[in-house]
Image: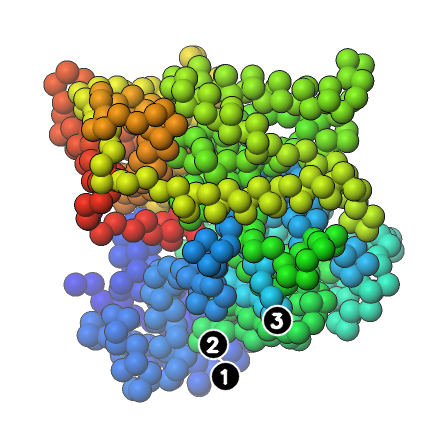
Amino acid sequence: MVLYSARLTKSGTKSWAVEFRHPVLKDSKGKQGRKIRRGLGFDKEQAQIIVNELNQILEDPTFWSLTEQKRSLALFNAKVADIFFQQMEEETIQDSWNIRETYIKLPKNTEGYSRVMLLGATGAGKTTVIRQLIGTDPAEISFPAISTSRTTTCDTEYIFREGNWKSIVTFISQAQTIRLVEECVWEAFRKAVTGENDKSIAKALLSHPEQRFRLSYLLGQFRSSEKPITTEKVSNQESLIDVPYPDQNILQSDLMYILSEIKLLSNEAQSTCPINDDNVDEVITLKYEEWIKEETERFNDLVDYILQLIKKRFTAIKYGVFHKDNRGWPEYWYHDSKDKLELIKMMRWFAGNEGRRFGELLAPIVNGIRLEGPFKPSWWKNHIPPKLVLIDGEGIGHDSNITTSIPMDVTTRFKEMDAIILVDNASQPMLEAPKIILSEAMARGQLEKLMIAYTRFDQVHGTNMIDEEDRFDHITGIQAGAIEGMQEANNLNPKLIRQLRNHLEDFTFFFSQTHELQNTPEDLKDEMDRFIESIIQNTKKASINNIDRSKVFPEYDFGTLVLAIEQTHQLFMNKWLSLIGIDTKTSQYQPQHWMRIKALSNRFANWPNCVEYNDLKPASDLASYLMQRINEFINSPRSWSIDVDDGEKIKILQSISEFVSDRVNELIFNRIKILNQEKWIKAYNFRGTGSTKDRRTEIRSIFEETIPQPNIRFNTVSSELLNDIKKIIDEAIDFRKGNSVSNYEINPLHFGL
């Protein structure tokens, strides 16, 4: 057993810090002994006491368990226990969905409610549809926020219910925030090393490559000149907010200090190990990546400085209650009010994007928002709101030409929904993202829940279109073509496709001028009324149309199931071997930069339960490809226990696909991440000449183990996968028969919920 010790070290010119290697936590190479550094303030004597007590814990393995935290608090300074157990606690992932459920529960269809998930490409108009449905008053506040770029970066849930206005907001963990800040500082450091100017360094710092985590919201925008700040005109109500705008001079001073520290870090790095190579990117990574985190104090101190600035932003919230952990990091914020405007105003900090408030907006660290109150459209005639739950998430395929699937955290929620709404832009209908959503929903057993809402219908024009009927025909014709293409691409049962076409004849909606909130056009009111009524009636119909599952079920020839694995292997490898840069000749996908592939391997290796980086989502892609092929198999049974009409058969087959869908997500997550954890760590930690090639090779071996190519003589890995899939389908059929199945619950934490 290796024993480590803590030491007192300087942190800046006047303050002190403690450094030690943790005996339980692993470092980025998967080895025991993660380096920990924490600031201890200005009092050297008190700092030394903390170091001495910390050494007592490090010398006694009986303290090295979370169950011993209370005992350590009784024996030592509270800060000592905090330092030792902090990251151990953060390794255990918190379920934000369950926190929101604890304080504001989502009502179900058994209570008369319809749960509605809105999906669409970024910019399709989901947010404007929601603004109409919840009755946003433009004279009050711009909520939910809209802009020309991505605005929705976390799930937002709206419950239409009489009573007070309630809200709960959940946050990413402090550990995840630190990782993201580290990545932002590293990107800024790279710019500094290559001699970029302050503006370029600040841009790299303030906008994470994934675009979800934007430090500019928390720290403010960097300004390279003294020009006055120009802002858009806002409503009188919005300008009367009782919290002043952030002081730009203070924000700019903080940013200038951060930039100066990054440039000092760059100078220290280059004096320690100069760069004399044309391939700057690889040399920076090779020479500095480990040095910057392990050998220098400035990097860790700067990350901690930024973290403390972020924590200060919570003080701007004057209403509601934060529940924080013992390190002062918020787990959730809750508020209950009789005043709608008061609650909606608070949302500007958690979900807003107003430029004048950059420097105090918390949106980058929010991972979920749930609102409850008597929401209803502005024109709604009944004083009782419609019984709806709206769930709005991040747009699909944001500025990406490699997206082929919906994230697993979304598809895992399908079974809990009563309606899945594809929101699409009528002026550019059925591009790639809408087709992906349609295809995924079909493969995962959601046909009866599917609806399509076209926004911007008023912008559909053409010399071949005379009236509104021509515009309807134009859109529905493109929609029909997309569905036919889906049948060919996925070899779907023609009866299933016919059922989808017939279903969408009643559940396709056309919205014009959804941005008109104050003077909502009559035709939009009528269409949205039809939309709401259709959701409610379809939910009621589904709840009373249950077939006797014990008598009617399909029977299969499992000998053909191997084809599903073989085809999945071909599709997945064709895409991903090209993306990682191994086999690019036969694929439409361009190789990704080696830094993006390395970042992906870091997510798999070192981020708990994370299986994606930006638009690189191998787990979701594989689950999608496999589910599409399994759905083909499910829709081609050998026979039926009892003959029923085609419509009833499709409903039964869809219910089987829905059951199988979650199991496939879990199966793929376990195979690609859990069972290959050590290999991902190995792939991430390749360094030096040839490391890019070595990483590609290692990732390829991971993919080949996850989805092996079947052959006549099965190896153990491929036969295990086939047996796992067969078992899942058998359990789905047993469930149809009314038999009990193994206690199986998809853990949404696996997919970042």
* Residue 385 horizontal/vertical position (percent): 63, 58
Q: Which quadrant is the N terminus positioned in?
A: bottom left
The location of residue 582, given as percent across then percent down, is: 38, 21
Between circles 2 and 3, the one closer to the viewer is: 3
| Amino acid type assigned to the residue bearing label 3 in the image | Asn
Q: Identify the residue under disc 2.
A: 40
What is the spatial separation of the Cα atoms under label 1 and label 2, in whole angstroms?
8 Å
Q: Classify 10 Å Cα crowding around label 3: few (below 14), some (14-19), many (20 and above).
A: some
Query: What residue appears at the point 68 percent right and 19 percent down from the top-left corner?
Result: 474
Q: Secondary structure at mark 1?
A: loop
Residue contact between numbered discs 1 and 2, judged by CB atoms under 8 Å: yes
In the depicted view, which residue is nearer to us: 189 or 345? Answer: 345
Amino acid beneath label 2: Leu
Q: CA distance from mark 2 to mark 3?
A: 44 Å
Under mark 1, the amino acid is: Asp
SS category of the residue bearing label 2: strand
Q: Residue at x 20, y 72 (%)?
A: 61
SS class of the residue under badge 3?
A: loop
| Residue 355 x %, y % | 75, 54
- Label 3 vs label 1: CA separation? 49 Å
- The residue indicated by pointer 3 is 164
Q: Quadrant of residue 730?
A: top left
**Residue 41, position as x, y percentages in the image:** 51, 78
Residue that numbered label 1 is attached to: 43
